Structure formats: structure tokens, C-alpha cells
Amino acid sequence: MLRPTVSRLVGWAVSAVICFAAYPPNRLTAQGLTPRDSALHALNRLAYGPRPGEVDSVARLGVMRWIESQLAFERVPDDRLAQRERGFKLLDYGREELAQRYGAALRERRQMQREMAERGDTSRPRGAGPMREFRELGGELQQLAVVRATLSERQLREVMVDFWANHFNVFVGKGADRFLTPSYIEQTIRPNALGRFEDLLIATAKSPAMLFYLDNAQSIAPGASPPVLARRIRPGTAPRAPRGINENYARELLELHTLGVDGGYTQQDVIAVARIFTGWGIDRPQQGAGFAFHEWAHDHREKQVLGVRIKEEGMDEGIRLLKLLANQHATMHHVSRKLCARFVSDEPPDGCVDAAVDAWHRSNGDIRAVLRAIFTSPDFWAPQAQRAKVKTPLEFVVSAVRAAGAEPDSTLRLAQVVGRLGQPLYLQAAPTGYPETQAQWVNSGALLGRMNAAVALAAGRLPGASVNLDDVVSATDDHAGLVDAVNARLLGGTMSAHTRSVILRQISDVKDPTQARTLAVGLALGGPEFQKQ
Amino acid sequence: MTISRRVFVKSGGLALVSLGLDPLFLNRAAYALRRPAPSSAVLVCLFQRGAVDGLNMIVPHGEPLYYRERPRIAIPAKDVVDLDGHFGLHPSLAPLKALWDNKSLAAIHAIGSPDSTRSHFDAQDYMESGTPGVKSTSDGWLNRYCRHDQEHAETAFRAVAFGPQLPRILAGTSPALAIDDLQAFGLRVPQEAARDKLTRAFEELYEGAATGLLASSSQEGFAAIQVLKRVNPAQYQPANGAEYPPGRFGRSMLQIAQLIKAGVGLEIAFADLGGWDTHVNQGSSDGQLAARLRELGLGLAAFAQDLGDGMRNVVVLTMSEFGRTIAENGNSGTDHGHATAMLALGGPVNGGTVLGRWPGLDPASRFEGRDVSVTTDFRDLFGEVLARHLGAQDLATVFPGFTPNPQRFPGAIRS
């Protein structure tokens, strides 16, 4: 079962009593930010944008105190989200059950294909039984991420889950990852999102989803063969050539997960890492496809990685290597820089990266300490960082829904909107994940898509969102007052004079106050200011 | 000549900057001037997702082994549309025979990836990233081509993928449009007047308040809307009596033809066709694969007929992630194999021949004892088309880690 148990939640809360150092009181004012400016900035980066009134409430509380509470997320009550999560069947199924349901869907598909081929029907089989059910579970996986991002009070944690799920990307469209990804998110990423990097790294390395996605499950020592011949060889086909090591996971582990492409490793290191992970595999899917170490597949010879001798220790070699990698300076720098690209700017200044690396050294890789160093670095609050980043499609959709005081409805459609705008969740095939930079997201078709989504949301027609603008901005004949309210309540006061005048002109001939409000909100959320964070 | 014109326009733009003219005006003026000549070369890439059975598409009917290995699914010799005595077209591709005869259609056999994966996911990824064996490449080779060759970069319709999302092959930093349907591109408001008003409002918002990439991309989008208003996709009538097959693929081909004729600066078009993963009941002259090939053949033939003389600047290239086993399996289908066949169609194509070195089907020459061996690296074909048809200068940046060698080009483009 994927749902976190109550006792585990309590465990987190108890272990997370962290003392915060007092922040230099004058740092923010030194940057020339008003309390509202700084609240908006923090809500744009540590959260999926402000809900109506939230800029004020965070400013009143004090932005640093709010950031502290987000870091200590276990103490933030999140009852409404918990209630919504109960509607997700996906969370009631464990890996084994999902595997069985996937198997049933495959059998239905094969059966349908056979029948359709006999009829000469070449359309795509769309089964109504197990296939349909499994498709819906896949939709639930995406929708759950959108619902959590929109509704959770523990916003920073959701942002970090998204960051790590993307850093340690898996592709839900690849074979067994269709049923392995849900537990990857629930049990590998979420519990470790604000923990220690080393634990997260080890958890991903041992996760069946990653072992399958990057083919490590197929990587075996040259010449090794299983103790019993597991595969029956089909008559008429030649037996498969003996497989050897597969370097995919090893390469991505070094290049993407830890050291970074310029992290100073060689092809010889990649091969040695691949040999260390030979034997790290998956149990048979029927038994739930859990992690298994296959002694027979392991390469028992000595290895050397980054100049360090790794002596023969079976599975422990891999653990030792992951700890070694987690504590390399190159890893700290690579991951810190990526965090700064998420939280500060696409090309982050050295200052915040260095601060994050220092905190990493000092805290032994405590992700909260690293984040705190970023959020207290002058670069984070610098004027150049304000609204410097373009929102990803997920950030755009979720922030627009939040800004409009809306909620995801009980369908799976809001996640589909995110997908149509270019970021189908868990469907990035390349192990790089989605980039942290704007070039991926900004193109003309995508921008038009955002304008359409904004207009639809304002009109209450966005699929998957239930909206009630009356709770946010009242409809009024006073157009100037209306636009000012839209600016204050939805844009956090960022509306430019130009945008204000264009919107005023557009609504000037609209008699009906509700229609004027719809148009003003649509233009504001689809306009250039709201694309930035 | 076209190059010098573009250089002139670019340096002319710089000169205007130094005169201190209004930047908005400058953008507009430069944009208007930069429209390329409508006669530019076009490449249309079609991805047969799922791994097409190259042996039943371009049939080696001259090889007894072909019939021995496929007792239930081989195309009977009497049905094959013979091409050269050894190879022939699947009967569903008969509409393409005239194009073969007029030498605008070529087939490339035994082509594929140097990577041996039999995973659809990995193999498609490699064919689109253009870096077989390297998974971390974040962009696609068509996008890298666009980035490296900046001459057309300013037109909104330079690179268009037909479908809801930008495919991996066009992903990257160079602008590319994903269009599900030309008729639905733009703001979705039913009444035209209201749509124009809303479009104008957003255009003004972005002109005045957007900077950087947001500004340039929105400008491209609104320019594209303007162009489409003129092109008026809803009213399009194919020429020369061309009839596109019903369905998504036919509609994509029709809209590609329409964009080419409209002279909007289209250089790269991309579309997908699925349904090639024929593990079970693949069929022979009729059946599952036959139906998919019929749609492909009718779509390509209609496209060539519709464009008519316009095909002189167009190359259509089909591709698929790998081929299928030489022997049929126990379910009258085929499993994942290695090399497959691709088609090249268009005026610049060195048509009327089956290109590539044919390794034969005998067990000694097979890949891992079961599949057609790859004798042409797909990058040699793609590279040749980019270099000889589109005039790409630096293939090494489009296919990193690969040194393209014109001597290995299969010869798909007439020199």
C-alpha cells in the first residue's frame, strides 16, 4: 500500500525538530524589498504562487518565518489535501497489486489485438476492462501531483518532490515503469525530498523504477548466467547472445544524478561503476518487482572509481560507491547549481551556489540546510532574481488555478491541461528530466496555449478546474477598480502600467460586469507578467 | 544569392538600430523583410512508430529464404509490385509505383542504428536525438540542424510538428511549432470578430510588457496567426484531384502540403504514424500491416499529386526505430529486430533504386543470428539529406560524436 502510515508521519514530525538560526534582520530591507514584495517572491519560488490574500498573510507573518515553517513541513497541518488524497485509488494499491493490474491490462490488450486483427480492424485497441482501469490509474498518478501542488499547505515540499522526481527522472511510458512509478514517487522520492541527499541517492539506486528505466536490472557480469535457466527458448528463434554489463545507469548516475557532465570522471569510471552495480536488479514482476541483489550476476573483480579502490564486497560495493559520490565536491556543486537554477535564476550567480555547497559540506548533505542557505543568500533576494524565471507549464497551470482561488475538480483533466501545454508529467523519456531553464517552455504554440488556458480558466471553462471568481474579485461597473483588484489579488501587484491600460481599453465597451471581470482576469493570467515568477 | 540577401537584411537591421529607431517598428520591419523565398527546400520526416517490418514493406521477393522464414506472412510473389527483379513493394504501396517509375521514389534497405537495443523507447529516443547509445542528449537532431543553420530562423513556420506535442526530434532551443490542427491554431474563440479582438489584446500586452524569449516567441505566434488567417486552412482544396486518405496521417500530409504552397517559410515538417508493432497476426497482402501501409501509400501519393511541380524542392523521408525478425513468430507476427527499410520521396531524390548494401537473409550474415544486419547507419542517410538537400554545412554539430563521411552516404539525393 502506497499511503504513508500515521506512525511514519509522526516519526517525521518528531525527527524534524530543527532549530533555526536567527536571520540577519536587515538583509531584506537592504535589498530594497517591501514585505509584500518579498512575500510574493518567496511564494513564487518556494510555492506554486500565491492564493488570493496569501501575499498579505505571509508578509504579516514575516517571510523568513514562513520559509522556516515550509522547511519544517511536518508541523504544517495539511488536512484538506489528506481528504482529497483519499479519492485516489492509486494510493490504495501496492506495487504488487499494480503489477497484477498491469498484467491484466496487457492480457486484455493482446486478446483485443488478436480479435481486431481477425476483423481487419487497425485502430488502437481501447479496452473497457482492466486496460481502462489501468489507464485511469496512470491518469491518477499525474493528477495526484497536480492536486498536491495546488492544494498542499506544505508547498515547498511539493516543489522539492517535483524537483527530485525530475532530477532522478524515470519515464512512466517504458514497460514495467508503468506500474513501478507510483511507488517510486510515494516511497522513494517523497519521504526523502527534504532529507539527506545520500539517502535519496541510495533510495533511487535501489528503486525498481530506476533499475528498470536505466536498464541496470539487465546488467550482468560478462559470462555470468543465472543458476537455473529461467527463460524457455522459443522454438525457431536463436537463443539470445549472452548479455554483459549495461552502462546506462552508471553513466547517468555520474553525469546527471551526481558529479555532473564536467565532474571529472572518465569512461573507465563509467565501466567500473557499471560493474559495481551488476547484480542490482528486480524481482519477478508477479512478486511485485521489488529490489533484489543477484549474487550470480555480480562482477566480483576489484574495481577502481575516481582513483578509489573498491574491494569485493558484493552489494555493499554499490552502497559504498553511492556514499562516495554523494560526498564529492563535484556532486555538491552540480546539484546545488541545479537547485539554484530552480530557485534563483536560470543562470544562477556563483554566490548562492557557493553558499549552498558550503551548507552541504557543513551539514553532511542535509537538503534543508542547503535550501536554507539558498533562501538566505543575497542572490535569492536580489532585484535581478525577482520575476526572472518563466514558469513551467505545471507551475503556470497550478499558479493560475491558485491565483483564481480555484481547485482541481474530481476528474483527471487538469493534469491533461499541463500535458497539453508541454509538460506531460512523468512522461519525459530522456533521463535528463525537464530542463530548469525557460528555453524548453517558451515557444509560440505553447504561449498561445497558455493564453487559451487563462481565458478558459477565467470563464470557468478550463477542463478540470472549478472556479468561483466571486471569492476573489467582485464584479463591478468600476472598471478601474476592477483592474486594480485583479492586479492586487491575482498578480500580486506586478501589473505594468501598459498592461493596465490595455486591459482597461479592452473592457471599456463590455457592459456586463461579470463579462468584464472574466476578460480582465483572462488577460491578466494569460499576459506576460503572469508567465514569470 | 539567397544567403547574401539574408546577410544584407541582418546587417541592415543592425544599421537601423544605430539610427535609434523605435524598437517595435524595427522588429516589425525586420520581420517583414526576413520572409524567405517560398521556393526554399523542404524536408518532411515521417516516423513510423512501433518498428515497421521493412521486409514486408520493401519485399526481397528474389530470396527463397524470405519465403522459407515466413510461411504464413510473406507477400506472395504474384502480389508483390516488382521494382528491380529482387525487391518489390507491398501491394498496399502500389499507389507509389508511378513515383518509383518517374524516379522520385527510392528505398533504403538494411538501414538502422548502430545500437543494438530492441526497446522501442530507447531506439526511438536514439533515432530522434541522433545519438545512438547516448541517452542524456536533451535535444533532437532536427532542432540542432535548425540551430546550426540560422538562415530561416525568424519565420514562425520554419519547423512544424503535426501533433499535440513537440516530438523529441524537434525538441531543443531552436523555435519549433507543434500544431495539432492548423485550423485550430490560435486563440479559441468561436466568433471571428471576438477572436480577432482578443488576439489583438494579447498581442498588445506582449508587445508592451514582454521581454526576451517571451517577447520573440509571442511575436512569432501572432505572426503565425496572421499568416494562417491569410492561408485560411478551412478553405483548402487539394490540387490535381489529389485525395488524401481519411484519418490523422492524411490530414497531416494535407496540411503540410498547404503550408508548403502558402510559402510561409516551412523548411522542416514532422508527422507520426503509429501501429507498426505487429507481433500478432501481422497479415500478408491483406491484414494489419497491409492496412497501415495502404494509409501510408495513399497519403504519400496524394501529397505528391497535390504538390505536383512543387515536389521539386521537397524530400519526404520515412523512418522507424528498428526492423523486425526475419522469421515469423508463433503468433503469425514478427518480433523486434534490427535493420529496417526507409523511403525517400521527392524531386531531389535519386529515385528508382533500392539503395544501401543488402546483406542478405542467410543466417551467417544476420545480426545476432535472427535479424537483418544494419549496413547503413541512419545518420548517414539523415546527414546526406541535410547536407545535399537542405545545404547543412556542419553535420558534426547535428550528429555529435559521429563523423559523417560523404563516401558512406547511401546516395538518396541526386547530385
Image (cartoon, coloured by chain):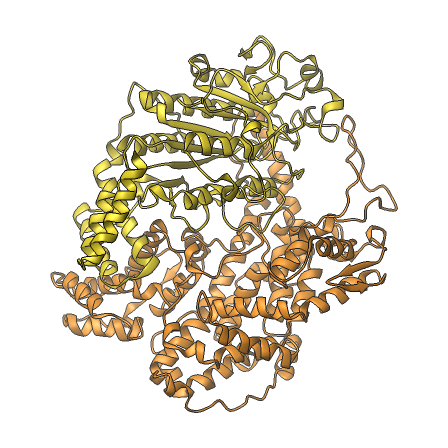
Chain colours: A orange, B yellow
Residue A417, percent from left and from top: 41, 54
Residue A224, percent from left and from top: 84, 46
Q: Tell me if A182 is positioned left or right of A207 in this view.
A: left
Vertical comparison of A511 with B316: above or below: below
Vertical comparison of B210 with B106: above or below: below
The answer to whether one can see residue A13 in this image is yes
- Taking the spot 82% from the left edge, 50% from the top edge, the residue there is A297
- Taking the spot 14% from the left edge, 63% from the top edge, the residue there is A505
**Image quadrant in which you'd find residue B380:** top right
- Taking the spot 64% from the left edge, 49% from the top edge, the residue there is A101
Residue B220, percent from left and from top: 29, 49
Residue B291, percent from left and from top: 50, 24
Seen from the viewer's position, the closer of residues B293 and A246 is A246
Quadrant the C terminus of chain A occupies: bottom left
Q: Residue furthest right?
A: A227
**Image quadrant in which you'd find residue A484:** bottom left
Q: Tell me if B22 is positioned left or right of A193 in this view.
A: left
Quadrant the N terminus of chain A occupies: bottom right
